[in-house]
Amino acid sequence: MQTQFPNSIQAGISLRVEIATPDFPAPDWQARAYLRGPSVIDLVATAEGSAHLFYKGYAETSNWVDGLYDYSIKVFDSTDAFEIERGQTRIAIDKMLVNSTYDARRHEQRVLDAVEAVIEGRATKDQESYTINGRTLTRTPIADLLKLRDHYRVEVARMSRPRARRLLRRQVKVRM
């Protein structure tokens, strides 16, 4: 049983996430998950004992658009609503729908690879700009490319870390 929403979801595979919330047990509380990213996905949980079960079959998930999504899980009763978890999850494309031109790298990784290729190709070219027949070509300075490379290295490292955060029922340790 999962205690939090997954960091990644595979489209075309059944999704089954059971979340136990002792402070907000089913069926007294209704749980919903809202995913916002390349498309809008709303999930309604059913009661599984006192836990909340989010379930979608493979036929439904196969149509989900791949990409990075922010999610929010909220619980509701007749008078109150609380957000119990939020974070980001990545939906991976259904592999049955992939064609030969599909690039599995994330955007950040593709940009980093492109910047590094430009830096590598520029190692032998010392002109930043030149003019031929009245047309001017200006290249991005190496210093700017190095800054861009460093920025995207940080982004690639950040994207590979999980980011789900529980908002309630967190244990906070204090030493005095």
Image: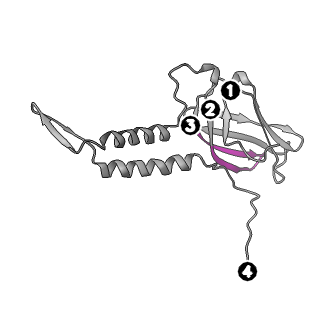
Residue 37 image label: 3
* Residue at far front of view: 124
Residue 53 x %, y %: 80, 38
What is the span of residues highlighted in magenta in the rendered image?
Answer: 68-88
Residue 138 x %, y %: 21, 41
Q: Is residue 53 magenta?
A: no
**Mark 4 or mark 1: whose residue is earlier in sequence:** 1
CA–CA distance between discs 3 and 2?
A: 13 Å
Residue at horizontal 58%, vertical 21%? 98
Residue at horizontal 27%, vertical 48%? 141
Disc 3, disc 2: CB below 8 Å?
no
Q: Is the residue 34 above or below the residue 101 in the image?
A: below
CA–CA distance between discs 4 and 1?
A: 49 Å
Q: Is residue 121 left or right of residue 153?
A: left
Residue 61 image label: 1
SS of the residue under disc 4: loop
CA–CA distance between discs 2 and 1?
A: 10 Å
**Which amino acid, by three-letter code, is at mark 3?**
Gly
CA–CA distance between discs 3 and 1?
A: 15 Å
**Which amino acid, by three-letter code, is at mark 2?**
Ala
Residue 75 x %, y %: 74, 46
Residue 78 image label: none
Q: Residues within 10 Å of mark 1 (few under 14, many from 20)?
A: many
**Which amino acid, by three-letter code, is at mark 4?**
Met
Residue named by callout 4 = 176
Residue named by callout 2 = 92
